[in-house]
Amino acid sequence: MSSFKDLENFEAEYQHWVDHNFPNSTAAEQVLGVGEEFGELAHAVLKGLQGIRHTPDEIKKMKKDAVGDIIIYLTGYCYREGFSLADCLEMAWDEVKFRDWVENTKDGT
């Protein structure tokens, strides 16, 4: 069982919501949503770097919104594929957290 309890609670809430609102959505649609939202995040980062079109507060809000939407779409992708976002995160973190790129610049191990 995952130690990411809050994320698991979110996943359960999400599953109820998506089954009600988008019962026929597919994993492919979820991946496309991730791509769209990543584009929005990239846009916010670029405009923030350029210092144009938006205030710093607007840029921050746009970034946070895009990150949240990416997580929601990733949750949908995992659900449609039959696995848990929390489990995916825990599995990846269990590998990544032991890497030390300061001491081992070649491969982190």
Image (cartoon, grey):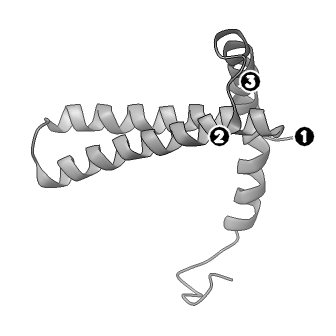
The residue positioned 76% from the left and 30% from the top of the image is 8
- Residue type, label 3: Asn
Tag 3 residue: 9
The disc label shown at residue 1, or none: 1
The residue positioned 49% from the left and 32% from the top of the image is 69
Locate the N terminus and report the quarter of the image it occupies: top right
Residue 36: quarter of image: top left
User: In the displayed structure, would residue 21 be above or below residue 70?
Assistant: above
Element under label 1? loop
Residue 50: quarter of image: bottom left
- Residue type, label 1: Met
Q: 58 left or right of 15? A: left
- Residue type, label 2: Ala
Locate the C terminus and report the quarter of the image it occupies: bottom right
Residue 20, percent from left and from top: 70, 9
Front: mark 2 or 3:
2
The disc label shown at residue 28, or none: 2
